[in-house]
Image: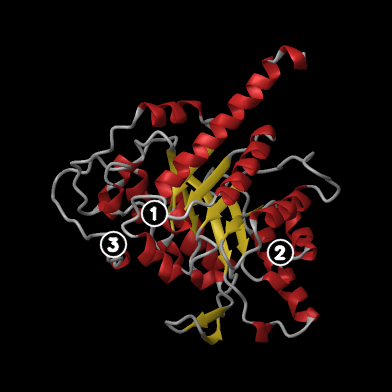
Amino acid sequence: MFDQFTTDPYSFDEVTSSPITPVTPSQDVLRLGRLLPRSIYLGCASWNFPGWKGIVWGETSGVEDLTKRGLTAYCKHPVLRAVGIDWSFFGTLNEMSYAAMANQVDENFRFLIKAPQSVTDAVKRDPKGRFRSLNQDFLDLHAAMHEFVYPVINGLGENAGPLVFQLSPIPRPLLPTQAECYSYIDRIAQFFADLPKEVEGEQPIYAVEVRTLSIYTKRLLNALRPSGVRLVVGVHPSMPDVIRQTAALRYYEDPDAQGEDWKMKGPLVVRWSLNPIQRHGVAKMTYAPFNKIVHPDPATRSGIVHLLDIAQKSNQKSFVITNNKAEGCAPLTMIEIARDVVNKLSSEKDAQLDPRTL
C-alpha cells in the first residue's frame, strides 16, 4: 500500500530479508528516554532509512520493506516517541493505510500527519512546482474532512498526534494588494474555525504552518486565535528563524505577554525540515546515507529546547519532528535535543536545591 511512496534511492540501497530488529540502546540513550518528560514527543519525519543501522535498527537488522514493517522496531527506541507521515502531503491515504501503521506501535506513540497538498495549496503546480492553475479544492472543508481528517482519526485513533496543514507559498501575482492578502487571511481563519472540535470521540490537534510571509502577520494570528488551531514552528529556509517564530507564537498565545513570562494554551508543534545553509536536493546528496550529524545547528536546537521548556511549564504536550536534512541524521538530532532537555531540567532542579537560593 506504500509502494508508490518508496522511490527514494537511499531508502533501499541495502536489501536483506532478515527480520527488522531495534537497536540495543546504550545506557546513555536509555537514561535520556527515562528522564525525558512523558509529555514530550520527539521523532523523525519518516523512518525508511537503512543508514540508521546501529542508531535505530540493530546492527544485524534487515532493512527490506522498512516503510511497511519498520515502525515496530522504530517505536522501541527510548527517545523516539513520534514519527511524521510526510508522504500524505503528495497523495491521500485511506483509513486502512493509517490503521496498518497504528497496529505496529504502542498506545503511547504518536504520529504527526501532513494534510494533502490538494487542500493546502492555493494553486496546482507542474512537476517543477510552477503555477499551472488555481486549485478549486484549496481549503475545501468537505475535501479536508473526507480525504484527511476522517481517515486519519478513524485509522490512527489515539495514536493521532498533530494534523498539520502546511499552507504552501501563495504565488505573488495572487496577492497584488493588501485587500487580496486580507481576503486570504479571512479564508484561512474561516477554514480552521469550521473544522470540528471532536471527530469519532477524539479531539484532533489541528496545526497550521504558513509558508507565505506576506500574510504571516499579526492580522493572521488575531484571525486564527479564536479557532484554537496550533501555530507550527517550522524550521525551514523559507521561514523566519526560530526566535522570530517564537515571538509570533508568544503573541498568538497572549497579545499582551512580554519577555519570557508567557504560557502556551495548547500543544507545541515544531517541524525542523531543512538546515538553513542547505537546499533540499543538495542536502539530500550531502547527508546520505543519513547516519551521522554533518552540520550541527546548536542555535536551532537551543531555540527548540527553549520552546519545550515553556511548554513544560505551561503543562502542555510537545511534538517535535525532525528531518534528516536538518543536520544529517534525524534520530541523532533528536537524541541531542533530548539530552539538552534533560540537562536543562537537571540544572533547574539543582538550582532549586542550592542552599543559597533557599
Circle 1 sits on which residue?
A: 46
Q: Are marks 2 and 3 in contact (CB under 8 Å)?
A: no
| Residue located 65% across and 43% down the image | 307
Query: Eyeballing the image, is 59 above or below 299?
Result: above
As drawn, the label of residue 10 is 3
Give whichever of discs 2 and 1 has the lower sequence position: 1
| Secondary element at tag 1 | loop
| Secondary element at tag 3 | loop
Q: Position of residue 338 (x, y in %)?
A: 50, 37
Point out the residue furthest to the left here. Answer: 17
Give whichever of discs 3 and 1 has the lower sequence position: 3
Q: Is residue 222 left or right of residue 111?
A: right
Q: Quadrant of the C terminus?
A: top right
Q: Position of residue 238 (x, y in %)?
A: 59, 68
Q: Is residue 46 left or right of residue 227?
A: left
Query: Eyeballing the image, is 256 above or below 194?
Result: above
**Residue 1, picture quadrant:** bottom left
| Residue located 62% across and 58% down the image | 195
Query: Eyeballing the image, is 170 above or below 276?
Result: below
| Residue located 66% across and 87% down the image | 173
Of circles 3 and 1, which is in front?
3
Q: Is residue 120 left or right of residue 289?
A: right
Q: Residues within 10 Å of mark 1 (few under 14, many from 20)?
A: some
Circle 2 sits on which residue?
A: 189
Does residue 219 appear anywhere in the picture?
yes
Q: Position of residue 113 (x, y in %)?
A: 48, 55
Which one is in front, 14 or 251? 14
| Residue located 56% across and 62% down the image | 236
As drawn, the label of residue 337 is none
Q: Are marks 2 and 1 in contact (CB under 8 Å)?
A: no
Q: CA distance from mark 3 to mark 1?
A: 13 Å
